[in-house]
Image: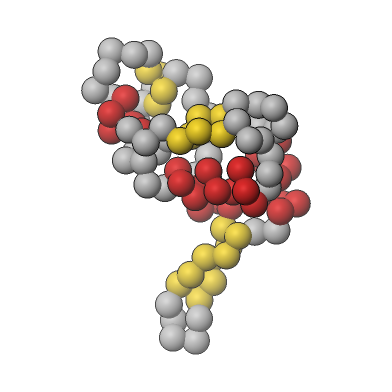
Amino acid sequence: MDHIKGAVNRFWKQDFEERVNKYRKRYYLLKPKKNISLLYESLGIGKGKEVILYCGLGLMSGATYYVIKYYLDLTDKVRLYDGSWNEYSQTSLPKEP
């Protein structure tokens, strides 16, 4: 699948640990801050950096928005492109495979 030119892919579930309760229902908890903070910093996300998040439909990138802005407090310059790939793919703007 193509992506927005210059975008870096990070699957939102990588920030969570999957657990199973006594009723065999899956749920997710955020990983410790130290574990995921280093991963985001290795992608160049840090204080003062502008980050624009998107996903397929604009739903799952909300979890990453929360993690970057509030849980990790990496940058306050984080925005969510709510049109996401669904909207962007219909434009003539640059894309990469």
Please report the residue visible at 56 percent of the width from the left and 34 percent of the height from the top: 78
**Residue with the most extreme left position:** 90
Q: Quadrant of the N terminus?
A: top left
User: Where, by quadrant of the figure, is residue 96 drawn?
Assistant: top left
Please report the residue visible at 29 percent of the width from the left and 25 percent of the height from the top: 89
Please report the residue visible at 54 percent of the width from the left and 71 percent of the height from the top: 19
Q: Is residue 10 above or below residue 24?
A: above
Q: How many marks?
A: 0
Percent from the top left, x then y, of residue 42? 70, 34
Please report the residue visible at 64 percent of the width from the left and 59 percent of the height from the top: 31
How is the protein colored in the picture? secondary structure
Q: Quadrant of the C terminus?
A: top left
User: Where, by quadrant of the figure, is residue 26 drawn?
Assistant: bottom left
Front residue (pair 71, 57): 71
Q: Is residue 92 above or below residue 2?
A: above
**Residue with the most extreme front position:** 76
Q: Is residue 18 above or below residue 84?
A: below
Q: Is residue 44 left or right of residue 51?
A: right
Percent from the top left, x then y, of residue 35? 72, 52
Q: Tell me if I can see residue 66 in this picture.
A: yes
Percent from the top left, x then y, of residue 16? 57, 58
**Residue with the most extreme bottom position:** 22
Q: Tell me if I can see residue 42 in this picture.
A: no
Percent from the top left, x then y, of residue 67? 59, 48
Q: Is residue 37 left or right of residue 79?
A: right
